[in-house]
Image: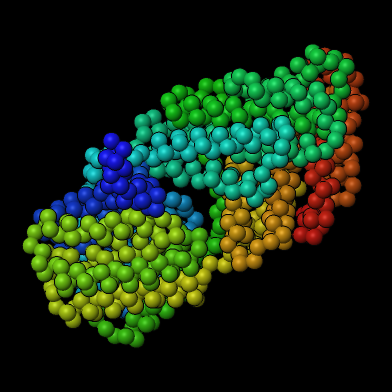
Amino acid sequence: MTVRTADARGWFRPLALSAAVLPAGWLGFSVRTWLALCLGLATAFWCQISSPAGTAVTVMILAQPLRGQALSKAAYRLVGTFAGVVVSIILVSCFSQDRPIFLGGVALWLAFCTLVGSLERDFRAYGALLAGYTVTLVAVNSIDRPDSVFDAAMSRASGIGIGVAATTVVALLTGTPEVWRKLIDEMDGLAGRIATIGRTGLGEGAVPDPMEMISLSAAVLALLGRMSHARTEMEHARIRLRGARCGIVGMLTVLSAARGLADLRSRTGIADIVLRHTQRHHAGPHEYAERDVVLQRLLDDILAEDPTFQPTPMDALYLERAAILIASRRRIAAGMETLRHATPLRDVPPTGPLWRRPDWAGSFVNAGRTLIGFTLFAGIWIALGQPAAETALAQAALALCLAAMMADTVPFGVGAMVGTACACMLAVALHFFVLPHVQDMVTLSFVLLPSTVVFCILLLIPRFSAIGFFFGVFLPVILGLGNHNDYDPDVMTNRIVFYLLAGCLSFIALALLFPTNHRHIRLRAAADIGHDLLLEFQGRGPGPAAERLSLKYDRLGHALAATRKRPVQGLASARVFGRLVAFEDIASAIARAGQDLDRAAAIPALAAHAAPARAALAHAPAPGVADALARHAAALLTEPPRDAVQASGNHLRAVLASAGAQAVSDLLATHANALRRYGLAGART
């Protein structure tokens, strides 16, 4: 019995090895992609379209491991193709007789689409970029035959339509994993990690450093992409996604509050009664309540135990941060319940669209790279004077456009060169030694199976995804799959030469001439942070709290990614990044304090100190403002008659106003040197 069990394990050992080495889900992903490829090619051959290879390319481009991703990308591919085809027909109709003007129009269209694609996210960006390089695939290839542009456009549209249909059918019928279930799993995992950080912030132990916190917040914001993909596949999507947004805001808020609480605990002076009651409320039931309600309950419980308790400004700040953490933890639970079961968020206020950082400067850099690169490539094309050289121009333009979606263009350029070279080598072997013996669709399907599996595995490994993309996408067109294959060696040789040229040109443009400058990315993020901090100093900060919070962490996430990509790492990089985090914290604290001080200033018993504190806040970060805010924070809790404040129910407002003033005072005092060094101290208009 023992021997037979060992033999069985040995028989399954290759599968166990593949599970340990290969990415999760590779087998199902490969089979689904292969089925869609076979269905698309069979349909294209049966319909006798002029370019069945375009259908295969569409299937490979739309290959995604999750159903919602494939459906979302397919929808934007149709929209982008339609826009590109229309522009192609217009350009060829108007400028086909004047080649320089025609190529200039194509270059400007590519630059415009790159600009739009750089400002968008997810597959919306892909749709915009596709509208750009479709013009090179249709219009540029028809420049010598302008009367055939409509036929070329319809051929491309037909191939893409069949590919989209094949991908959709396979995704719906084969049990492709759903994005929204993946979204729930990822949110559950992140919520658990963030809940642990929240408990640590209120209890004993150290919370992660700012870099780890921002890295975690970047993972939270990445869920917005999952939400965009999940919209195409779930029932009651509007209600469920509202819950997901609620949970994301709650998680980001917990991260902010936990950092503040951990910093306050590291100091002396927080009353033991405050620590005990905040921990007890955090461990209590999960019914949602707003920050002010949670804080009022905390104050009531503390005063019930010790009616003579008088909080200090540090106690008030700790209570306010603890209340927002507790409220946010319950917001996360309510959001997750809505996402799972589509139960309406009854007591939770709605969360508007979350803001992301629009990198206008980076978008114009991408557009300029596409414009200059295409102009250089067009010059090479004209200099070559070869009839088929437009193939290299079109494929190089494709790489230039799609690079706008990449955080780093160097690996993408390397992937374009290596992936294209691998596709060319395999195409040579198949073209001369295998395809001449293929007589039917079934045999062709099995011939394409190994390359499809390799493509899917590479696509699932982030380090090799660019290589896999170009390998899988270019292989069908290099093979020239069609209703009547031509096995002329000269035709195949020319095709390979021009595709290799396209790969080399893409590598030169993306990796050598115009590589991503991570230092500039961090500088742009820092400039945005400084600009918004100055606006906050002037009382003109951006947007509501939830939108401002998502914008804050999105910018810091970009700055962190650029910092980690820099070749030199050390204490200096960590220190600079820590200052950026501090500036964002100051902006958030000023916005929060301004709202609480305005409410307190409307109360006669508190106006004597709330109004001067609000006026002092309007002069931040001038010298002496931190000390003035600290004095007003203490006076708000001690000088108003206690009986009058409590009798009117305004103790809560006094605590919140004191907490806001104290938070800004601490941050201005702690980071005064950094504000002066970066030219932000006293920089008011």
In the image, is residue 160 above or below residue 666? Answer: below
Q: Which residue is more in the foreground, 166 or 479?
A: 479
In the image, is residue 346 above or below residue 230? Answer: above
Q: Name the quadrant containing residue 138.
A: bottom left
Q: Is residue 156 visible?
A: no
Q: Which residue occupies 50% across, 76% down?
A: 513
Q: Which residue is more in the foreground, 504 or 423?
A: 423
Q: Specify whether 337 is left or right of 663.
A: left
Q: Which residue occupies 85% across, 50% down?
A: 622
In the image, is residue 571 above or below residue 630? Answer: below
Q: Specify whether 575 is left or right of 384.
A: right
- Of all residues, the one furthest to the left in this rendering is 439
Q: Quadrant of the N terminus?
A: top left
Q: Quadrant of the C terminus?
A: bottom right
Residue 597 placed where, x, y %? 78, 33
Q: Is residue 22 visible?
A: yes
Q: Which residue occupies 83% across, 27% down?
A: 271
In the image, is residue 6 above or below residue 39? Answer: above
Q: Which residue is more in the foreground, 209 or 129?
A: 209
Q: Name the quadrant containing residue 302.
A: top right
Residue 554 placed where, x, y %? 58, 49
Q: Which residue is more in the foreground, 322 or 656?
A: 322
Q: Name the quadrant containing residue 230.
A: top left
Q: Specify whether 322 is left or right of 621.
A: left
Residue 3 placed where, x, y %? 29, 41
Q: Which residue occupies 84% across, 15% down?
A: 306
Q: Specify whether 642 is left or right of 462.
A: right
Residue 425 placed where, x, y %? 27, 72
